[in-house]
Each structure stands twice: as C-alpha cells, then as structure tokens.
Image: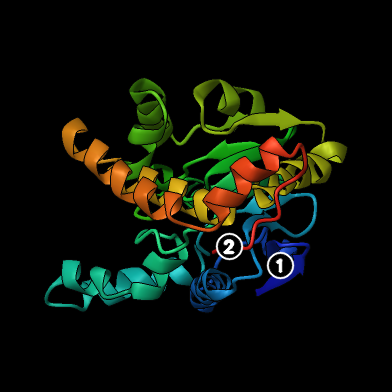
Amino acid sequence: MAIGITRDDRIATVTLSDPASLNSLALADFAALAAAWDELEADDSVRVVIVTGEGDRAFCAGANLKEFIPLLTEKLRNSPDPFAAFRSMDTVHRAFLKPGQLTKPLIAAVNGLCVAGGIELLQATDIRIAAADAMFSLQEPRWGLLPAGGSTVRLPRQIPFPWAMEILLTGSFLTARQAAAAGLINRAVPRDELGEEVRKVAGRIAANGPIAVRAIKQSVLACLDLPLSQAFEEEMRWAARVFVSEDSREGPRAFAEKREPDFKGR
C-alpha cells in the first residue's frame, strides 16, 4: 500500500491507498504510516491533519490477516519473551499513535468499512466523521486475536463502558448511526457530503490560533489519566505557554478591532 500525503491551505490529508485490500495494513505500511505522522508533526505549515482511505469501500480493514498477523504470531512464538518482542515493534505502535506523538488535531474521514486496526486507528483521532453507510467492527475476537492497537485501553475511556465491552467482545458490526449513538464517531453524513463536511471542520480548526490548538490537544492528552488536582495543575502549565505567545495578544486585539486575527504561530 502507498501512504499518500497531500497538503492544501494548512490542512494535510493522509490517505491509505490500497482499495483492492480494503486499505489493510501490511508490515511495511505501519512504518510508512508512522513516518507520515512524524513528517506532519515536524511540518510547521500544517495545522490540521485528515486521515482517510482511498476509494468508496473502506477506510481501513486493519492489519493484513494474510501477511502481517502470521508474521507477528511467528515472531512472538519464536521469542523467549513474547512481551518484549511485541513491545519492540516500535513502528506498529507509532503507526497507531500510541505514544501520542502527533500534537496537531487529527480528523478521520471514514469513507467506508472501518474494522479491526481501522477502528484502532480511528481511536487515535480527535474528531471522526463518517459516511452514513460506513460500518464498524473490532473483528479480532472472531479470529482468536486481541485488538492490541490500543483498543482495550482507549475504547473504555472514550465511550460508555457497556458500549465499549460489547464492541470489544462480540466482534459484531455497528452501523454509522449506531457508532454515533455510542460516541465512537461525532456524526454520520451522506456519502457525497463527507469530504465537504470534514474540510469544513478542518478549516475552522486551521483558522484558530495554532499555538492554542496544539496546546489544547496536548493538555487533554496529558491530563487524561491524572487525578483532578494534578490535572488542573497540568492544564495551567499549558495555559501559561499559550498566554505568553504573540498569538494570545493578537487574538484579543483582533476581537477589539472587529477583524479576523492574523496568527503567526509564535
């Protein structure tokens, strides 16, 4: 699969491009996806990132069951320490953004089937908009596997516990409407409106103060697993970094002058 990156007006789009395999991920694809996140994190011209799949059938069908999963299971079986072997697969973990290394907002445009590792990638995104005919499922337990791209950690923290456990344990499919009701996605829209809706949301974010936007995401991620008292302290640390920026002076000045702010990202 090719991992495509396009840039347009401060918005970058990462496209998983192997529609013949429903945009499933082979071993080399994990490294390419991890590299794409690193590239976009370092690109100061990019303020928002969209991730989607090529074609109209699938967002991502997860790890390739015929190539990647057999390689993974063989590697673990032949290791004296399967946990250490799994932990050493850095590119796989970075592809799923487990370390949270992308500080820019990430929007998923779910253009079709979103299963297994596709949902695990979805859980690493900040905003999720799907075509009304998209379908969602964590298929791993059906094939005797565990969804190790972060689902047993992220999903119960992101949506109500009973929904999370039903998705994790049954392997059943959810419609886009059900996924929205569960809180897995923000909303479902008609397929022909998906691109426009995602770009509209991305454009709103890109127009905001870039220092503030990135600090908001970083504060949220940093505070998720902290007790309240520590979390409020952490929030203040991020706020202090924002309020000393030039952008924090430009925003109120633009408001007072009844014009759009000219943020410089510093």
Mark 2 lies on residue: 265
Disc on res. 17: 1
Determine whether 72 is above or below 237 in the image: below
Name the residue type under label 1.
Ser
Tell us which disc is closer to us: 1 or 2.
2
Q: Nearer the viewer, residue 200 or 234?
A: 234
Please state the horizontal and vertical placement of residue 156, each as a whole percent of the image: 34, 33
Q: Position of residue 27 (x, y in %)?
A: 48, 75
Neighbourhood count class around disc 2 (C-alpha, 10 Å): few under 14, some 14–19, many 20 upward:
some
Residue occupying the point 58% across, 33% down: 185
Label disc, if present, on residue 245 of the rendered structure: none
Quarter location, residue 259:
top right
Which of disc 2 and disc 1 is earlier in sequence? 1
User: Residue at 35% of width from left, 50% of height from top?
Assistant: 240
Name the residue located 70 percent from the left edge and 48 percent from the top edge: 261
Residue type (three-letter) at the residue carrying disc 2: Gly
Distance Cα–Cα, label 1 vs label 2: 32 Å
Specify the quadrant that holds the C terminus.
bottom right
- Secondary structure type for disc 2: loop
SS of the residue under disc 1 = strand
203 left or right, relative to 251? right
Q: Is residue 200 left or right of residue 137?
A: right
Q: Which of the 4 image quarters holds residue 201?
A: top right
